[in-house]
Image (tube, helix red, strand yellow):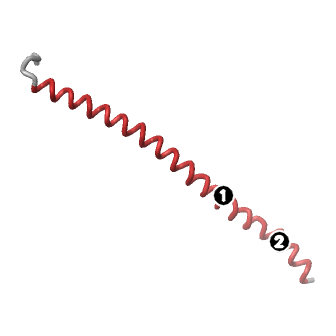
Amino acid sequence: MAGSQDIFDAIVMADERFHGEGYREGYEEGSSLGVMEGRQHGKLHGAKIGSEQKDEGLRIIDWNDPEIPL
């Protein structure tokens, strides 16, 4: 009787085992993809901010230039 219970336990517990394995695999894959996506977002956002700062810096230079009419 104990042997037959082990078979059923393996079947019943398979759901929990697969859930845990799937969670771990998904977490690892998501972490890896999240790092790559974060780097890409950082590059794009950093380029945008750098472009805005460059434009603002040129405006400041223009405002201080006495030869440029305002």
| Residue with the most extreme left position | 66
Image quadrant where one finds the C terminus: top left
Q: Residue at x 16, y 29 (%)?
A: 60
Left or right of 10? Residue 41 is: left
- Answer above or below: position of 16 versus 58: below
- Circles 1 and 2: CB atoms closer than 8 Å: no
| Residue to which mark 2 is pinned | 10
Q: Position of residue 3 (x, y in %)?
A: 91, 80
Under circle 2, the secondary element is helix
- Amino acid at the residue labelled 2: Ala
| Residue to which mark 1 is pinned | 25
Q: Position of residue 29 (x, y in %)?
A: 61, 53
Left or right of 2? Residue 20 is: left
Earlier sequence position, callout 1 versus callout 2: 2
- Answer above or below: position of 51 versus 67: below
Q: Quarter-wise, where is residue 57 in the image?
A: top left
Label 1 Cα crowd, 10 Å radius (few <14 / some 14-19 / many 20+): few
Label 2 Cα crowd, 10 Å radius (few <14 / some 14-19 / many 20+): few
Left or right of 13? Residue 41 is: left
Out of 69 and 1, give the one closest to the viewer.
69
Under circle 1, the secondary element is helix
Question: How many numbered marks, from 0 up?
Answer: 2
Q: Residue at x 6, y 21 (%)?
A: 66
Q: CA distance from mark 1 to mark 2?
A: 21 Å
- Amino acid at the residue labelled 1: Glu
Left or right of 21? Residue 70 is: left
Q: Residue at x 86, y 77 (%)?
A: 6
